[in-house]
Amino acid sequence: MARTMSGIQPTGNLHLGNYLGALVNFVELQRQYESFFCVVDLHALTQRPDPALLRRNVREVAIGMLASGVDPERATLFVQSDVPQHAELGWVLTCLTPLGDLNRMTQFKDKSAQQPENINAGLFTYPILQTADIALYRAEVVPVGDDQDQHLELARETLRRFNFVYGDTFPEPKTVRSKAPRVIGLDGEAKMSKSKGNEIGLFETADETLQKLRGAKTDPARLRKSDLGHPEVCNIFALHGFFTGDQQREEIAAGCRSAQLGCVDCKKMLAQNLELVKGPIRERAAALREAPGKLDEILAAGAEKARTAAAATMELVRERTGLRHR
Ligand code: TYM
């Protein structure tokens, strides 16, 4: 069975961008692929998180994956640092990656601007570790949002180089996009992200979400309810696209264009429909938080399976690269 692999950083609570851009596809792909889904705590170290907070976030992201429908019976769910081969293969691939390729990465520039006091080498080599994550499981498809395009392109180039230098070893991983590869935040401008503070959290209560939606940007040309609206340029309407049925969406679009429906009511409808998805996720997450032993078991079993797969790949890598000297 072909394999899929993806990771999420434990840098804060999961949001709708993670859910629509990645998690929805994890749940879909786990039915067709041998799946490896990972909480990438080594990547998060590039932001030098408080250790207690990192520990909490690792568990919360794992809980979020499970609550969203990742099924540990089907998929291998694990924490990156539980599988030492990620760092090991990362080093091998570091030695195959030209500095020039890393220099082109826009995320390095963005992250450096976000944390100018801590521009560490890990931030720079971050995409190599990501390539190792994928390669370690010899994954063929990688479900991610479009902010990962450049990293995935680099991964393909690096693995092509490995195959050229050492012989055919790794498949070239294809990017799999969901219907929402780029969810825009509540500011109506930037990609929804933890660092921008423009997110709707997956675990937020209905009230918290409604509060946030109240302040969210809509059609900039619609200042009063009596102004005719343009749903096609409104981010709230775009979000309805993922949570609202066709009929209600048509009614909303017509009401907005004719100024019969105001933004406040449109937002309330979105909040209600969102709650139909988020409510059950929140409940499953709460149940998992109450059973920490169960989460430990799931992550330990996942780590064991991931280590077995990783060890097999590293055998091959050691053999091909000459690292096995006996
Ligand atoms: P991270 O933790 O920033 O995000 C996790 C996943 O969520 C997607 N995503 C979005 N999709 C649509 N709209 C948005 N606004 C949005 N925000 C986030 C991301 O594209 C990602 O799929 N470098 C990766 C983690 C990683 C990884 C890997 C991914 C490490 N190793 C190996 C795939 C394979 C990252 O920082 O994702």
Image (tube, rainbow, N blue to C red):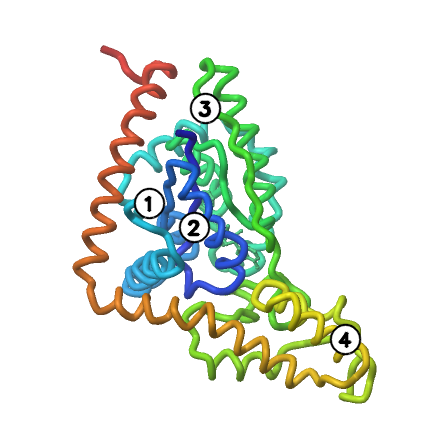
Circle nearer the N terminus (3, 4): 3
Asked if residue 124 is positioned above or below residue 234 in the image, the reply reads above
Looking at the image, which residue is at 59% across and 69% down? Answer: 244
Q: Are marks 1 and 3 in contact (CB under 8 Å)?
A: no
Q: CA distance from mark 1 to mark 2?
A: 19 Å
Does any atom of ligand 1 lie closer than 8 Å to the CB of label 1?
Answer: yes
Say which of marks 1 and 4 sits in front.
4
Q: CA distance from mark 4 to mark 2?
A: 34 Å
The reply to whether the residue tagged 2 has its Cβ within 8 angstroms of ligand 1 is: no
Residue tagged by mark 4? 254
Instruction: State the quadrant of the C terminus.
Output: top left
- Expressed as whole percent of the image width and height from the top left, the position of residue 183 reads 60, 60
Q: Which mark is residue 170?
A: 3
Q: Which residue is mark 1?
A: 80
Say which label, 1 or 3, has the lower sequence index: 1
Relative vertical location of residue 258 with respect to residue 24 in this rendering, above or below: below
Read off the residue under disc 2: 27
Q: What amino acid does circle 3 point to?
A: Phe
